[in-house]
Amino acid sequence: MCMHSITAIALKDKIDSAEDIQLIDVREPEEHAEFNIGGELIPLHEIVQQVTGISTDKPVIIYCRKGIRSQIAIQRLQEKFPFTNLFNLTGGTEAWKKQFNV
């Protein structure tokens, strides 16, 4: 099973060019409230139950703090559903903060 990934720089390019993507934050609500990059919050433990809210026809970038929980989320989704459009943000919000000095 293949897992696509995207860097913070490539993601920012997509956001800046208003590309049609979906951003999903799989962290916990308090982490999301503290800092987020615009993704909608679907905590990891709810990801499979919330599958109807995940697009199948455009790139979906899933992120967490370091990229581990988002990998788990993608694995769970790909095991149960025929997604081919999921991308893991490499390094998560930590990489984003480091890259853009946030």
Image (spheres, rainbow, N blue to C red):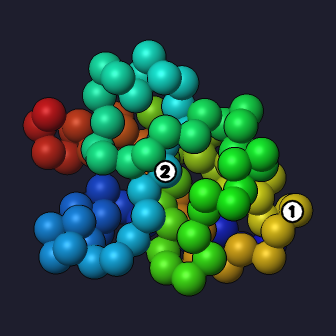
Image height of 79 relative to 71, above or below: below
Q: How crowded is mark 2: few (under 14 residues within 10 Å), some or many (20 or more)?
A: many
Can you give x and y, in whole percent of width and height, for residue 86 in the image? 59, 68
Image height of 93 relative to 89, above or below: above
Q: Is mark 2 on a helix, strand or loop?
A: strand
Image height of 10 relative to 99, above or below: below
Q: Mark 1 points at which residue?
A: 79
Q: What element carries label 1?
A: helix
Q: How many labels does the image show?
A: 2
At x 54% / y 24%, what residue is drawn?
28
At x 59% / y 46%, what residue is drawn?
70
At x 39% / y 48%, what residue is drawn?
39
Image side of residue 56 versus residue 40, left or right: right
Name the front one of labels 1 and 2.
Answer: 2
Q: Name the residue under label 2.
A: 24
At x 15% / y 68%, what residue is drawn?
16
Image height of 64 relative to 55, above or below: above
Can you give x and y, in whole percent of width and height, for residue 87 in the image? 53, 65
Residue 44 in which image quadrant: top right
Quadrant in which the N terminus is drawn? bottom right
Q: Residue 2 carries which label?
A: none
Q: Which of 90 and 57 is in front in this view?
A: 57
Can you give x and y, in whole percent of width and height, for residue 88 in the image? 53, 58
Quadrant in which the C terminus is drawn? top left
Image side of residue 86 versus residue 41, left or right: right
The amino acid at mark 2 is Ile
The amino acid at mark 1 is Glu
Q: Which of marks 1 and 2 is nearer the N terminus?
A: 2
Can you give x and y, in whole percent of width and height, for residue 66 in the image? 48, 36
On the question of residue 72 being in view, the answer is no
